Image: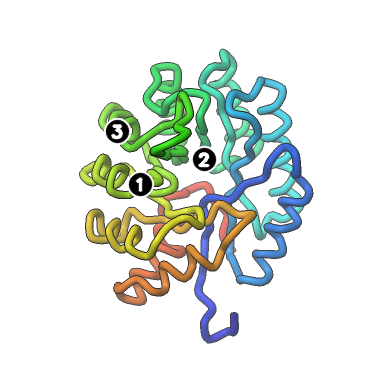
Amino acid sequence: MNSVERRKVIDVHVHIWLSRIENDIKELVKASEVYGIDKMLISPLSGYDPSVEELQTLNDHATDAVKRYPDIFDAYVYLNPRHDNMVDVLRREIEDKGKVGVKLWVATFCDDPRAYPVYEECIKYDVPVLLHSFVKTVGQLENETRGNHVHNIAQRYPEAKIIMAHLGANCYHGIRAIRNDKNVWVDPCGSIYRQDDLDYTIRQIGTDRILYGTDMPGSYNTNYGQVLEAEISEDKKDDILYNNAAKLFTKMSLK
């Protein structure tokens, strides 16, 4: 990528996995250098129903990555709504560890009552909640959030800042579900999508609620190329790649 092509980019959805922490950090740092990414937001992950100890380890690793590479990373606090200490963890990680958002994966549906305190606290702290949302024909996980669940929680907490990841995996399901929920943003992260998926999303909700995410480590160019090839103005491409996230994440550090 030469200087002429250089655009400001915030990737709101990258991962470090418990089984390969250092390798993932190394790959992400390399990607930031190769592609000129201004900021990546780390979502640490392990199993589907992580223990209290696993979550603490993951959140500590995310904190360490931000300390080591503050110009590259910020991080979400990863929570499990099944844990009694969930709110205490959220408060500590945001107040003391500098986390800029919350990540919920598949321990419960996002609209499970056990997750309600997450949204209530995130409203107080003015931080977004990143929700894995994935509808599948085969292999749907027991508590895997889908677009209708995101809609439910958006309606219950209209002041919450909610991010539905992956366009819901099937955009014709996920985007339709949240189309009128103005407090729901989406990201097209992953490498499984066609250009039509992003184009459909833009037609349905415009560009102001679309954030750029990749699911790295993994493919970067697929998602980046979809934004560049979208039939929208250059300013709107910049909004997706950078500006929307810069406005949404009020606690994120930017140069």
Of pointers 2 and 3, the one earlier in the residue sequence: 2
Say which residue label 3 marks: 148
Say which residue label 2 marks: 101
- How many neighbours does mark 3 have within 10 angstroms: few (below 14), some (14-19), or many (20 or more)? some
In the depicted view, which residue is nearer to us: 105 or 78?
105
Direction from residue 35 to residue 147 in the image, left or right: left
Q: Quadrant of residue 128?
A: top left
**Residue 246 at least partly seen:** no
What residue is rendered at 38% in x and 40% in y?
161
What residue is rendered at 26% in x and 31% in y?
155
Work out which quarter of the rendered image holds the C terminus and state it: bottom right
Q: Nearer the viewer, mark 1 or mark 3?
A: 1
Disc 1 from disc 3: Cα separation:
12 Å
Q: Nearer the viewer, mark 2 or mark 3?
A: 3
Direction from residue 51 to residue 8 in the image, left or right: left
Q: Amino acid at mark 2?
A: Gly
Say which residue label 1 marks: 170
